[in-house]
Image: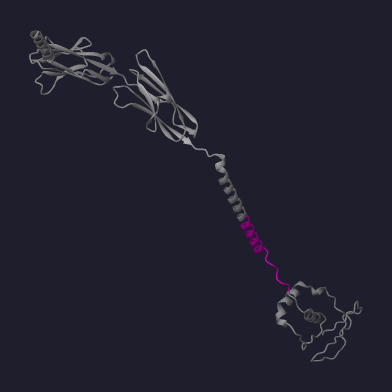
């Protein structure tokens, strides 16, 4: 019984030793279409002679330990040795991967061992939020639509508002597959306009290190309620009324001053002693003699000189008819003169006037 157990242990160790003769990594590789894919195969058994790389069961690269890479029937496939490995480790390089390259990659040490890994090729499409930036009033609901097309496999889509991820319960997602096994994903998001925000739609597949993003801006307009406007409107109306009254008062004052300047107040009427003026005028007209020795209280003749000259200009004394008959003057005088008859200029007198100069 003990011998049987010993034989089983020796057999398992032999199997492990055989399995440890080569290593292939990574076991699974996912790349985007157009990117480079690399697999490394290392042989611990230095007695190998030929290493064969297969892509989906088809020989892609043949490597000889003595001569290196022998042939490569696939144009976008090459192989290169790992530095410092004494040519026991080789890297299988798949340049510019295509969708048809997806599948199994096998490293076969002829007559020793073989390992297989998996290659997945994904395709990156586009993403776009429909429409431009949006404007909404506070409290209104705004709908955003996002569309991601040309992806493989079906991508994951989610929303962010101000860099905060939106719960999946707040938006819907629909997907469809085209004839080229490419997926189109659409989603609608409803946002309550509370404040201005940045709305992002993000789409990704596992090979993408950073999701693709499309963004729009939501601008929220705040409308004041009627109750909030009552007090400001009342204050504005009161100030406007006061300002109007002030302007009206200023206009009245300016108009009054302008009228005062345009129509100055008439000078106070000057009065004069008619007896003095009349005395000189009558004496001149009648060729009589004025009593130079008479004087009275009040202003002198010099004070009325200017006024008398103005009256002379305004009065036409030529309209007076001279008295043809004898005119007698009786007035007390310091220099008395003899009374005599005056010359008669006309024979038929019309009127007789007697003037006494005092």
Q: Residue at x 38, y 18 (%)?
A: 184
Compared across the picture, whether 239 is left or right of 313 comes to: left
List x then y, in percent, for residue 67. Answer: 9, 15
Q: Nearer the viewer, residue 202 or 271?
A: 202
Q: Quadrant of residue 131?
A: top left
List x then y, in percent, for residue 227. Answer: 56, 41
| Picture quarter with the N terminus | top left
Q: Is residue 288 above or below residue 208?
A: below
Q: Is residue 267 magenta?
A: yes
Q: Would residue 145 be seen by someone viewing this image from the given angle?
A: no
Q: Is residue 52 magenta?
A: no
Q: Residue at x 7, y 13 (%)?
A: 47
Q: Quadrant of residue 174?
A: top left
Compared across the picture, whether 53 is left or right of 327 comes to: left
Q: Would residue 88 be seen by someone viewing this image from the given angle?
A: yes
Q: Is residue 164 above or below residue 49?
A: below
By secondary structure, the bulk of the magenta-drawn segment is best described as helix
Q: Is residue 80 above or below residue 249?
A: above
Q: Nearer the viewer, residue 245 or 112?
A: 112
Compared across the picture, whether 64 is left or right of 98 comes to: left
Compared across the picture, whether 121 is left or right of 50 comes to: right
Q: Which residues are magenta?
A: 248-269
């Amino acid at each position: 019984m003990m011998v049987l157990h010993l034989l089983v242990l020796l057999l398992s160790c032999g199997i492990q030793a055989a399995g440890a003769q080569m290593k292939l990594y990574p076991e699974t590789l996912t790349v985007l279409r157009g990117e480079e894919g690399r697999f490394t195969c290392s042989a611990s058994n230095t007695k190998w002679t030929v290493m064969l790389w297969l892509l989906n069961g088809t020989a892609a690269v043949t490597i000889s330990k003595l001569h290196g890479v022998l042939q490569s029937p696939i144009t976008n496939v090459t192989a290169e040795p790992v530095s410092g490995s004494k040519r026991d480790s080789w890297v299988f390089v798949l340049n510019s991967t295509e969708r048809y390259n997806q599948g199994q990659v096998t490293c076969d040490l002829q007559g020793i061992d073989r390992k297989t890994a998996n290659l997945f090729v994904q395709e990156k499409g586009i993403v776009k939020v429909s429409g431009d930036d949006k404007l909404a009033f506070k409290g209104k609901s705004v709908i955003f639509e996002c569309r991601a097309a040309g992806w493989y496999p079906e991508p994951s889509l989610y929303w962010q508002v101000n860099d905060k991820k939106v719960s999946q319960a707040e938006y819907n997602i629909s997907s469809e597959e085209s004839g080229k096994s490419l997926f189109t994903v659409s989603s609608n998001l409803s946002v309550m306009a509370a404040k201005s925000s940045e709305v992002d739609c993000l789409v990704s597949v596992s090979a993408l290190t950073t999701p693709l993003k499309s963004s729009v801006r939501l601008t929220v307009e705040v409308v004041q309620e009627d109750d909030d406007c009552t007090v400001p409107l009342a204050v504005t109306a009161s100030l406007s009324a006061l300002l109007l009254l002030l302007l009206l008062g200023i206009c009245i004052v300016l108009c009054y001053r302008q009228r005062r300047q345009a129509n100055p107040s008439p000078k106070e009427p000057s009065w004069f002693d008619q007896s003095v003026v009349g005395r000189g005028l009558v004496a001149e007209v009648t060729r009589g003699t004025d009593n130079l020795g008479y004087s009275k209280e009040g202003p002198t003749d010099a004070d009325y000189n200017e006024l008398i000259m103005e009256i002379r200009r305004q009065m036409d004394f030529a309209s007076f008819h001279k008295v043809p008959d004898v005119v007698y003057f009786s007035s007390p005088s310091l220099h008395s003169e003899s009374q005599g008859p005056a010359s008669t200029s006309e024979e038929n007198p019309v009127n007789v006037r007697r003037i006494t100069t005092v």
